[in-house]
Image: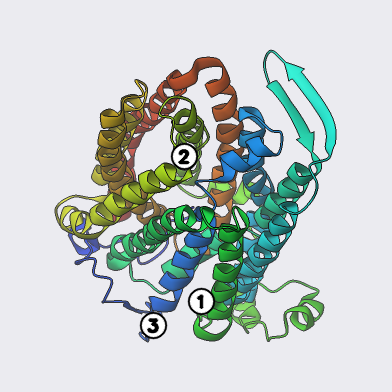
């Protein structure tokens, strides 16, 4: 998911025509650091993003089956899914702030290492006896038995969330090394790398889950993938030279802990009088940032109602198994790559970020309504609307957010945005399970209405673009 001294930062005064990205081609993986002019390869960052998504998506098709097998129900599935977001709400702002002080690479490494350890813990849950801890029989929450392996899965997801600053730090890193005019294009590349992970992950899960090793095989795959991602960050991602915040008073201890020298930017900041780390109140004082954070929250809320409700819907109504679930997510991700590649490339030359966000949110809301009947044809038709909506809206939203927030506290703002996304994920994932228990397929109507509200609120983004360009 997703600076300054309270004024519009310098460098944001370019005209809209100058902000249009060029073709999104994965082969053109270099970017020029806007401050140093050096050519920086995006390929390692894109690879890490791909591997991170692959490690997550590989368990997506069978997690709901695993939760049911261990004694849970729809509510427990939503609650287990929300553990990552709940603890990311705590961890993401801290990691985003640290990335402004200690460098993006080091915090990316810390975050990826946490993901690796969390999957090892997750694997252990598969070999623990299903020992009941307590039982619940409720008209609202349904009937379920909370077992020891479920508790371990909850802990694994919580630990991954606490160290889960990958997305916000990666977005800040990308914004650091990308010129204003290339933001949309490079965020499009990041989205493509994510969706490539979503193509390979579910497909690989479908293949591995039918082997003699069962659910353990995809989890072992996630461990191996996370290990590769950790090594990539350690050896292939350079530290960017962006410097934003004053180092803390205990920097010597922190330096020893991380084993590297903190960037020497204290003198410059003291000379300019720009010291200290921004608190939440300060972030809210940045022009137009609060409005963007509200939109960030609502978008994630709609998405996460869908992410909980759809697997339950696929099992109960469509009668899908793990393989069919994997095929669906693979098709969806393939369509997203097409949209975020050639379609976004052409559209962004003609339309502004705000226009793409408005149109994309309309398409995305329509996708959720098509899921309500539970018809197979409409379900796959909905993937076209999902891909068109999300593929145009989300990279453009991230691009606009980075432009509005500016460069100085890029990591901090991205971290707070990630926290808003996490708060929405907690709400949406739990709410999605509860709504499906009560409303069945009509839960998608709630998700659709949330995104339609975003569609209406997005019209104000045209004013934000005007402020940037004036």
Residue placed farthest to the top in the image?
139
* C-alpha distance separating marks 3 and 1: 13 Å
Q: What is the x, y in percent for residue 330? A: 36, 51
Q: How many marks?
A: 3
Q: Residues within 10 Å of mark 1 (few under 14, many from 20)?
A: many
Q: Earlier in the sequence, mark 1 or mark 2?
A: 1
Q: Give the quadrant of residue 25.
A: bottom left
Task: From the viewer's side, name the closer residue of 110 and 104.
Answer: 110
Going 48% across and 67% down the picture, which residue do you hit? 51
* C-alpha distance separating marks 2 and 3: 43 Å
Tell me, what colour scheme is on the image? rainbow
Name the element at disc 3.
strand
Q: Are marks 3 and 1 in contact (CB under 8 Å)?
A: no
Q: Which residue is mark 2?
A: 321
Of badges 3 and 1, nearer the viewer stands 3
Name the element at disc 2.
loop
Residue 123: numbered disc: none
Of badges 1 and 2, nearer the viewer stands 2
Residue 40: numbered disc: 3
Of badges 2 and 3, nearer the viewer stands 2
Q: Give the quadrant of residue 14.
A: bottom left
In the displayed structure, 402 sits above or below 281; it is below
Q: What is the x, y in percent for residue 137? A: 75, 18
Is 24 positioned to the left or the right of 157 in the image? left
Residue 242: numbered disc: 1
């Amino acid at each position: 998911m997703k600076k300054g001294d309270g004024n519009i930062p310098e460098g944001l005064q370019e005209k809209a025509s100058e902000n249009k990205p060029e073709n999104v081609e994965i082969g053109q993986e270099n970017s020029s650091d806007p401050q140093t002019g050096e050519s920086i390869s995006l390929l390692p960052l894109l690879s890490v993003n791909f591997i991170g998504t692959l490690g997550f998506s590989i368990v997506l098709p069978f997690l709901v089956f695993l939760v049911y097998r261990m004694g849970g129900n729809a509510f427990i599935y939503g609650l287990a899914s929300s553990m990552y977001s709940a603890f990311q709400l705590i961890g993401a702002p801290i990691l985003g702030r640290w990335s402004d002080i200690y460098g993006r690479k080091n915090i990316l490494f810390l975050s990826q290492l946490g993901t690796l350890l969390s999957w090892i813990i997750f694997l252990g849950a598969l070999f623990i006896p299903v020992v009941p801890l307590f039982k619940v029989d409720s008209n609202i929450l349904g009937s379920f038995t909370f077992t020891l392996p479920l508790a371990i899965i909850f802990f694994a997801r919580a630990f991954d969330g606490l160290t889960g600053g990958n997305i916000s730090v990666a977005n800040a890193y990308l914004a650091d090394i990308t010129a204003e005019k290339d933001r949309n294009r490079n965020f499009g590349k990041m989205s493509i790398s994510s969706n490539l992970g979503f193509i390979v992950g579910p497909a690989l899960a479908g293949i591995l889950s039918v082997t003699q090793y069962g659910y353990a095989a995809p989890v072992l795959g996630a461990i191996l993938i996370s290990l590769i991602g950790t090594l990539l960050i350690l050896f292939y991602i350079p530290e960017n030279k962006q410097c934003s915040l004053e180092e803390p008073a205990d920097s010597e201890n922190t330096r020893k802990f991380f084993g590297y020298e903190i960037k020497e930017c204290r003198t410059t900041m003291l000379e300019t009088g720009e010291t200290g780390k921004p608190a939440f109140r300060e972030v809210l004082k940045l022009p137009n940032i609060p409005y963007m954070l509200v939109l960030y929250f609502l978008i994630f809320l709609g998405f996460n109602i869908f992410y909980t409700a759809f697997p339950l819907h696929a099992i109960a109504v469509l009668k899908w198994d793990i393989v069919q679930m994997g095929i669906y997510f693979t098709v969806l991700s393939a369509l997203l790559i097409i949209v975020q590649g050639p379609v976004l490339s052409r559209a962004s030359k003609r339309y502004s970020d705000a226009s793409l966000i408005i149109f994309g949110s309309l398409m995305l809301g329509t996708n959720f309504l098509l899921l309500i009947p539970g018809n197979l044809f409409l379900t796959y038709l909905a993937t076209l609307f999902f891909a068109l909506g999300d593929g145009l809206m989300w990279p453009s939203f991230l691009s606009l957010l980075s432009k509005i927030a500016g460069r100085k506290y890029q990591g901090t703002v991205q971290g707070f945005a990630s926290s808003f996304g996490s708060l929405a994920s907690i709400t949406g994932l739990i709410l999605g399970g509860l709504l499906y228990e009560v409303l069945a397929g009509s839960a998608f109507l709630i998700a659709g209405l949330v995104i339609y509200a975003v569609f209406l609120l997005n019209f104000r983004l045209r004013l934000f673009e005007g402020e940037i360009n004036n």
